[in-house]
Image: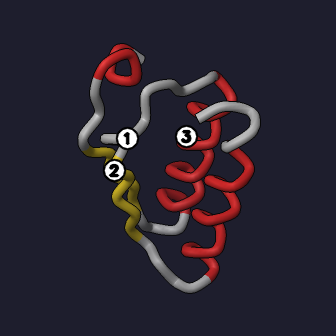
């Protein structure tokens, strides 16, 4: 997830939150790279959900992404 793909990720998450989802599971099994912008987006989404009483779970993290 980089500067090009991060806005789509955030937009999708925001749509889910607007629809009333309070819990999101992020399957990162196909993710091979996360920029600081992508990591920031994950943190912002998690904070937004947590502030509303929800949560984000991350699963299937591998390789370089796991080292973050």
Residue labelled with disc 1: 30
Q: Position of residue 49 (x, y in %)?
A: 51, 61
Residue 25 placement, left or right of 9:
left
The quadrant in which residue 54 appears is bottom left
**Color theme of the render:** secondary structure
Residue labelled with disc 2: 27
- The residue tagged with tag 3: helix, strand or loop? helix
Q: Position of residue 62 (x, y in %)?
A: 28, 27
Instruction: For the residues labelled 3 and 2, say whether their Cβ atoms are less than 8 Å apart.
Output: no
Residue labelled with disc 3: 43
Q: Residue at coordinates 38% horizontally, 16% vertically from top-left?
A: 64
Q: Position of residue 38 (x, y in %)?
A: 61, 34
Q: Residue at coordinates 43% horizontally, 27% vertically from top-left?
A: 32
Residue 50 drawn above or below residue 6: below
- The residue tagged with tag 2: helix, strand or loop? strand
* Distance Cα–Cα, label 1 vs label 3: 19 Å
Instruction: For the residues labelled 1 and 3, say whether their Cβ atoms are less than 8 Å apart.
Output: no
Q: Nearer the viewer, mark 3 or mark 2?
A: 2
Mark 1: few/some/many CA within 10 Å (<14, 14-19, 20+): few
């Amino acid at each position: 997830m980089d500067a090009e793909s991060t806005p789509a990720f955030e937009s999708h998450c925001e749509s889910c939150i607007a629809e009333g989802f309070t819990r999101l599971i992020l399957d990162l099994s196909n993710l091979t790279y996360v920029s600081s912008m992508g990591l920031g987006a994950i943190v912002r989404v998690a904070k937004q959900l947590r502030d509303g009483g929800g949560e984000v779970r991350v699963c299937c993290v591998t390789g370089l992404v796991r080292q973050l």
